Image (cartoon, rainbow, N blue to C red):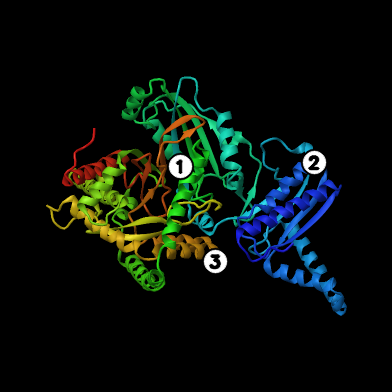
Amino acid sequence: IVHPFSYKYIVREIESKIIIHFILLLQEGQKSVKLIIMALFLNATSSLPYVLAQTLLKHADGTSGDVTLLSLTTALLFLCAFFLMNNPKCSHFVKSAEHIVTSCLGKLETLSEKLLLICASGIVVRWFRRRGDLKHSSAPSKSKVEFRRQTTSIGRFSLKSETATNPLLVTFFAALANEPGKNLDVDEFQTMWGERVMRKHERFRSRVCEWDNRFFEICPIDYDDYVMLSPHSSTYRTDLQRRIEGMLTTKLDVTEKLWEVRLSKGELGSSGAISKEKAKKLRKTKPTYTEETLCLFRAHHVLADGVSMSVALGDASDEANELNGKLLQKIDERNEKMKQRSVLQVIIAAFQKYILFFLLGSIKALAHQFWRMWTSSNPFDEILSNSSIPAGRRSTTWGDAASVDEVKQIAKLLAPHATVNDVFVSCVTAAIEQQLIEHKQLVSTKLKRNDESNLNDRNSNITIPSHINVVIPVHLNGGILLPGQSLGNKIGGFVSQVPAKMPFSNATSAARLRQVSASLRSGKNTPAPLISWMMAKFCSDYLPETVAQTAILKGNAKAVAVISNVRGFPFRVHWMGRPVEFLCAFLPLPPGIPIGVVVQSYAGELSFSIDADMRAVPDADSFAGWMMEEYDRLRTEAGLEKVQ
């Protein structure tokens, strides 16, 4: 069966015919099946091999066999050979054709034994299973059914660039409100996550192959290894902070599992996941909600990026169809606008895209990147090297910031073209300046006391530079995952030089915001995110691990912080009928960068999280306080009153 060079709808139709034919073979009593599919147009996200394996398990008892998807080159050769063998006019080519077919089959047998991908477009599935061995709601056993999918280049890059003290783990929590005795328990979570997320996204049923990290493999799901019931946080915020810091710094064995979640239940607002102010307000509006369920997740970056994880959380919600409908509506609106453009507008847009943006923009982006790599310095390097705190310790916090509408209004009033993200990048830079001032004052105090136990501090020369570098991650699909797309790592980024210390003592917060906005806009108007993604892909695919780690350190250009903006759900969602009151994600720190900040929106409200190296930021709560002080100054300068 040959896949045509056509669109996905035709491909899906042909895949359906393959499955129907396969079932007919089984119903005819076939006990051994070898199915060869010549995939001339089969993308890497096709679910055909796994569907075939599942079909066999449902319709056959004691059947063995294998499915082989050929790569383009082998498929064409195989197709030509079959044509020659079955065409009477080409009888003198039959012996050659038979030799080609035999060689192809022999090659396939060798590859099947190793269970490897055949080139880029092929997947091998091999099984031997009796019907009685299949358990309900479980993936195929590793020893019986094996299915491998290629990992993304950025996913492999995260495996290469992490260290023992800095594993690249995305940690996040969802806090649910519920009535007494109606907490989300382990069984309900398994049903919800299994039916809504794992069935749709096979990566949640996968692990990294132990013998080759270029591949995922479908693995059996023992929920006891993935979903755990934990005691609820005993001290407001403090205990939850300790748990989050532990999950961020404890390595996850990706050859066993890629994610895990811990559930706990207690009084509403007791853990600090839902703030006391929100809990008080919720008790007034919904008096029956007196308890909370906390779902604390962590997942390795090889599984997916933050946008993909957000999509998975949306799929787990009761409003999943509504969220997908809104996304499709936006896509249709955008396509409609594209259709309304005139021929002249299309030509101008193509010129801007390919000449101005890609060609000239790439030259500008690369020039800025190399200049910053060789001329910038990180003022925290001195602090990290002289700190008595062991490497790997983290300082974390989270909190509510403001409404999305208020932040947009502040940006509009104080800086033309400024965005929500620009406002909070400006707040972070002000907090970084204050953190450096505090370190400098601490060193000065020790020197005045003539503390002989801190000789390293005696030699410290902490300076507050006029500018610092920050990394801004950018999702290459615009922060969305299109219907039909698989989870992945479509993350690029760019380094931007922003003010740390304003040149004048009487400089306003609005002046800082305008400088930050102009600098970020300069980076956004170049293909720097795409270039960084391509460079990371190259390092992952072709460079040794040690070289890849050096490359990412150089590529960060001595950046002080990475600041990410995550677009959440526009309205409040529910899990199994329980409202999700608060969602919060923590950024894994890239190597060499001591501070990570996430600004996230949910139901019209903005919140933030901080994950920092404790040597650089000993108290994340103080750092958050400096951020919000700068935000209050921006609100005041914009002439807005604080909403209580």
Q: Secondary structure at mark 1?
A: strand
Q: Earlier in the sequence, mark 3 or mark 1?
A: 1
Residue at left offset 40%, top offset 28%: 271
Eye-nearest disc, 3 or 1: 1
Quickly name the residue at label 1.
Answer: 171
The answer to whether 253 appears left or right of 632 in the picture is right
Labels 2, 3: front one:
2
**Amino acid under disc 2:** Arg
* Residue at 43%, 65% in the rendered image: 531
Label 1 sits on what residue type? Thr
Furthest toward the bottom, the residue is 92
Can residue 58 be seen from the camera position used here? yes
Q: Is residue 50 above or below residue 227?
A: below
- The residue to which callout 2 is attached is 130
Q: Secondary structure at mark 3?
A: helix
Residue highlighted by disc 3: 542
Q: CA distance from mark 3 to mark 1?
A: 29 Å
Q: Amino acid at mark 3?
A: Tyr
Dot 2 falls on a residue whose secondary structure is loop
Q: Quadrant of residue 377?
A: bottom left
How many other residues sit within 10 Å of disc 2, few (<14), some (14-19) or many (≥20)? some
Most extreme residue toward the left is: 506
Circles 1 and 2, Cβ within 8 Å, touching? The answer is: no
Q: Earlier in the sequence, mark 1 or mark 2?
A: 2
